[in-house]
Image: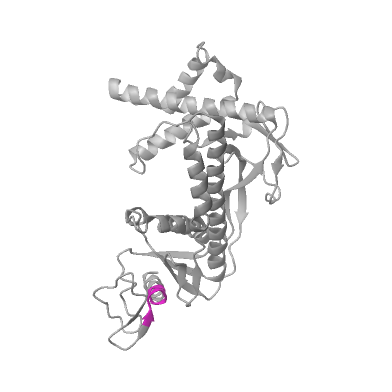
C-alpha cells in the first residue's frame, strides 16, 4: 500500500552577494537566539528551580528585540528565530526523555550554519524559491526534479565548512512499495570488504578517506603553518574543509547506491546490531571503522526498507556469526580476526565472512 511520507530534497544554490550577506546575518541571529534562550533556561532552573517553556522564551524574544543591544534581531526574518526556539525545546524534550545529552551552546566556528523557514517566510511559484527579506529568488541548481505538484512546507538553508550553500525542501510525497521478490540476503559488515553477502558476493570497501589521506594530510600541514587569524589561514582552512567534503560526498554516494540495490533486489535484508560507538574505542581500527560508516549504512537500510515495503531484520550483537559452523551448527571456542578461512571438526571449510553472512541470514529468518 502506498504511503505518504515527508521527504527532504537537497540542492546546491549560488547566492548573490546581497543574499549571502543577509543569510550570514540570519545564521548569526539564529545562533545568538538559541544560545541566549539556552542560557536563560539553564539559569532559571539552577537559580530559581523552575523550567521555562517554549512560549515563555518566545515572549522573551519579543522583549529582546526591543532592547538597544539586540534591536538588530528585528532586521532579519523572525521565522528562523522562532524555529531556533522550537529546536531548543525539542533538544530539552530529548534530554528529559534520556534520548540525548543536555543541550550545548552553538559555536560560531564549529556549529552548522543554518536557518529554517516555514511557509509564512518563503514563496514558491513556478519552481522559483524566494525567502523572506531577499531581493530575489535563489539561484538553485535543480540536479533532480521535485515530485510533481509538490509544495514545500519547510525550507532549510545551510552553508558547510567548505563554503558550499545548500537548500533543503521538505515536501510530502507518496511512495509506492516495490513489487515483492522471492529473495533474502544476510550481510556481514567488515573493513576489507564493506559487506559480505550470504550469496558469496563481497562488496569492496572503497576506503575513501584512505584514498585521499595524502591530499588531506598535505592540506592539514599547510594549515598548521599559517598564522592564526591571517587570511592565508582562512584559505588553508577552506582547502582542508573541501578535502573532508570530497571524502564525505563520495562515501555517501556509494552507500546510497549500495543500500538501494540491496533493498530493490531482496525482500528481506538481515544485518547485525553493531555497536560502533564501542568498536571505535579500538585505536587500531577506529579510523577504518569510521571510514566504513556502518552506522550510516544501517540508517539508510532502515528508512529505505520502510519506504519500499521491505523487511530489515537486525539480529542480536552477541550472536556468534563468525564462530558458528553453517553446516553442523558447532560453535568454535575462539576466532581471531586474523583467521579468514577455517575448517570445522565436521570437515566443512568456511570463508569466515561468507559463513558469517549465511549464519546471519539463517538467524534473521528464524527470528522473523
Magenta span covers which residues? Answer: 350-357
Rendered position, 274 above or below 320: above
The N terminus appears in which quarter of the rendering? bottom right
Q: Residue at x 37, y 59 (%)?
A: 285
Percent of width and height locating residue 7: 58, 49
Percent of width and height locating residue 59: 47, 20
Q: Quadrant of residue 356?
A: bottom left
Q: Residue at x 34, y 86 (%)?
A: 348
Residue 114 visible in rendering: no
Residue 145 lies within the magenta run: no
- State the residue lying farthest toward the bottom: 347
Q: Is residue 226 left or right of residue 350?
A: right
Rendered position, 224 above or below 195: above
Rendered position, 122 above or below 291: above
Q: Residue at x 37, y 81 (%)?
A: 350
The C terminus appears in which quarter of the rendering? bottom left
Q: Main secondary structure of the magenta part?
A: helix
Q: Is residue 316 left or right of residue 262?
A: left
Residue 70 visible in rendering: yes
Percent of width and height locating residue 60: 46, 19
Q: Residue at x 59, y 33 (%)?
A: 117
Q: Is residue 42 left or right of residue 15?
A: left
Amino acid at each position: 500500500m502506498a504511503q505518504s511520507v515527508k521527504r527532504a530534497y537537497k540542492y546546491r544554490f549560488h547566492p548573490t552577494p546581497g543574499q549571502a550577506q543577509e543569510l550570514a546575518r540570519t545564521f548569526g541571529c539564529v545562533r545568538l537566539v538559541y544560545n541566549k534562550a539556552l542560557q536563560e533556561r539553564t539559569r532559571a532552573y539552577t537559580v530559581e528551580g523552575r523550567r521555562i517553556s517554549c512560549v515563555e522564551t518566545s515572549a522573551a524574544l519579543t522583549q529582546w528585540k526591543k532592547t538597544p543591544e539586540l534591536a538588530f534581531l528585528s532586521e532579519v526574518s523572525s521565522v528562523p528565530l522562532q524555529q531556533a526556539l522550537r529546536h531548543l525545546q525539542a533538544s530539552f524534550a530529548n534530554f528529559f526523555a534520556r534520548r540525548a545529552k543536555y543541550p550545548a551552546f552553538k559555536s560560531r566556528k564549529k556549529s552548522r550554519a543554518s536557518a529554517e523557514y516555514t511557509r509564512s517566510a518563503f514563496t514558491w511559484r513556478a519552481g522559483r524559491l524566494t525567502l523572506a527579506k531577499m531581493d530575489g529568488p535563489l539561484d538553485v541548481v535543480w540536479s533532480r526534479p521535485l515530485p510533481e505538484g509538490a509544495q514545500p512546507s519547510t525550507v532549510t538553508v545551510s552553508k558547510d565548512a567548505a563554503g558550499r550553500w545548500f537548500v533543503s525542501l521538505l515536501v510530502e510525497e507518496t511512495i509506492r512499495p516495490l513489487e515483492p521478490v522471492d529473495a533474502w540476503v544476510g550481510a556481514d559488515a567488515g573493513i576489507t570488504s564493506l559487506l559480505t553477502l550470504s550469496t558469496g558476493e563481497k562488496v569492496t570497501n572503497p576506503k575513501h578517506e584512505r584514498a585521499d589521506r595524502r591530499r588531506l594530510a598535505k592540506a592539514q600541514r599547510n594549515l598548521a603553518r599559517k598564522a592564526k587569524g591571517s587570511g592565508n589561514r582562512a584559505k588553508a582552512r577552506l582547502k582542508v574543509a573541501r578535502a573532508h567534503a570530497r571524502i564525505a560526498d563520495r562515501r555517501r554516494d556509494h552507500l546510497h547506491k549500495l543500500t538501494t540495490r540491496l533493498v530493490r533486489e531482496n525482500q528481506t535484508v538481515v544485518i547485525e546490531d553493531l555497536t560502533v560507538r564501542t568498536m571505535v574505542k579500538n585505536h587500531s581500527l577506529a579510523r577504518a571503522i569510521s571510514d566504513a560508516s556502518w552506522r550510516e549504512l544501517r540508517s539508510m537500510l532502515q528508512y529505505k526498507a520502510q519506504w519500499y515495503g521491505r523487511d530489515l531484520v537486525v539480529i542480536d550483537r552477541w550472536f556468534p556469526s563468525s564462530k558458528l559452523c553453517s553446516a553442523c551448527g558447532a560453535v568454535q571456542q575462539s576466532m581471531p580476526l586474523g583467521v579468514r578461512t577455517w575448517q570445522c571438526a565436521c570437515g566443512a571449510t568456511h570463508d569466515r565472512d561468507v559463513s558469517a553472512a549465511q549464519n546471519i541470514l539463517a538467524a534473521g529468518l528464524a527470528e522473523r
